[in-house]
Amino acid sequence: MKVDGNHLRTIAPGADGWSVDIIDQTKLPHVFEIKNLRTLDQACRAIRDMLVRGAPLIGATAAYGLCLAVREDPGFEAIDAACEKLSATRPTAVNLNWALANMRAVLRDVEPHRRAEVAYRHAAGLCDEDVAVNRAIGEAGAALIAEAGRGGREMVNVLTHCNAGWLATVDWGTALSPVYAAHDAGIDVHVWVDETRPRNQGAALTAWELSRHGVPHTVIADNTGGHLMQRGQVDLCIVGTDRTAANGEVCNKIGTYLKALAARDNRVPFYVALPSSTLDAALADGDQVPIEERDAGEVTHVTGVDPGGEVRSVRVTPAQSAAANYAFDVTPARLVTGLITERGVVEAKRESLRAAFPEKYAAQ
Ligand code: MRU
């Protein structure tokens, strides 16, 4: 995607060829800052503290975090310890463990003195694969958007939740990739952006990247989607996923389930953009997905910029009130119209997923 005219990926090797550049997403939309990661611990912190976030980007950062570790110590004991450390940073997005397992399997058969070189090459390959997969999701999803707008004759309103865009992946995004592809093809598309409390990934990140790309959009409070659907102002919903179970149940940012319920009640198609790296065929159903619980401070406080340009955090709840912060929820497969994958649109059913991704189910 382009930021101020320059094509940028969200993660890339630094100028020295071995450190890793990321965008510090905790500072957006107020400050655009590239941060340079040089150690395994810095990579772990970047994932845990959500400088990088979004399932595919978490996976890509874990892969590069492992490169930083292998550079320090290419022994397999150290590699396993690094995998364990990276794996413990965030529990829900399966891409994290997918990327680590992938890297580990490749490094196993390599002589220790060549492991760092191979690790960097493989991490770069995983990133390129993410970009290609997202482009394919974009093409498949853009066809749905075009269809909703009668082949480009009418404006299409898409509702999305959280940020499953460029910032959540290496490039293009998953749920937003169809939006970019449709917009670039000249289709008149407008996006309703759920703010996505408590961390406001919609208001801060989705709105920022859509504005950079010039896609018309409107930020709405999280509770607004149902009302808009009742009034016929949403043509389709497209969201991302952090882990989709073998039976097609979708775990995504908290609040996704409520949007899916409202969509069903109003006969609005509800699509989930699913790169195969996010399909966890080893998990029978969504009940088994580990749901991250984050610091209650994300609920009790909001962060924003004051009129003087200073970024501040302010409390919005009484100091005496307890707060809970469940970061994800599970949407039953029956509420999902289709899964937009790199192999086309697939029904949210075990048999359909198995037919589309037999290699994922072969080991189960
Ligand atoms: O907590 P986050 O910001 O990492 O959650 C991100 C989401 O829920 C996205 O929808 C999901 O990772 C899909 S990203 C393409």
Image: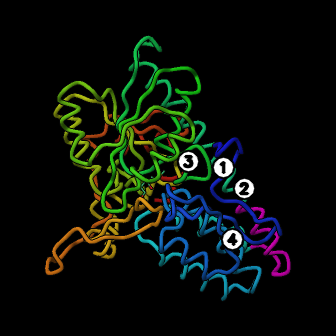
Residue that badge 2 annotates: 125
Magenta-highlighted residues = 109-123
Residue 129, numbered circle: 1
Residue that badge 3 annotates: 166
Name the amino acid, label 1.
Glu
Q: Are marks 1 and 2 in contact (CB under 8 Å)?
A: yes
x and y, in percent, of residue 319 in the image: 18, 79
x and y, in percent, of residue 85 in the image: 54, 82
In the figure, 258 relative to 225: above or below?
A: below
x and y, in percent, of residue 27 in the image: 51, 63
Does 323 sit left or right of 254 as displayed?
left
User: Magenta includes 117?
Assistant: yes
Measure the C-alpha gap from mark 2 to mark 3.
18 Å
User: Magenta includes 138?
Assistant: no
Does 361 sit left or right of 108 as displayed?
left
Marks 4, 3: nearer the viewer: 4
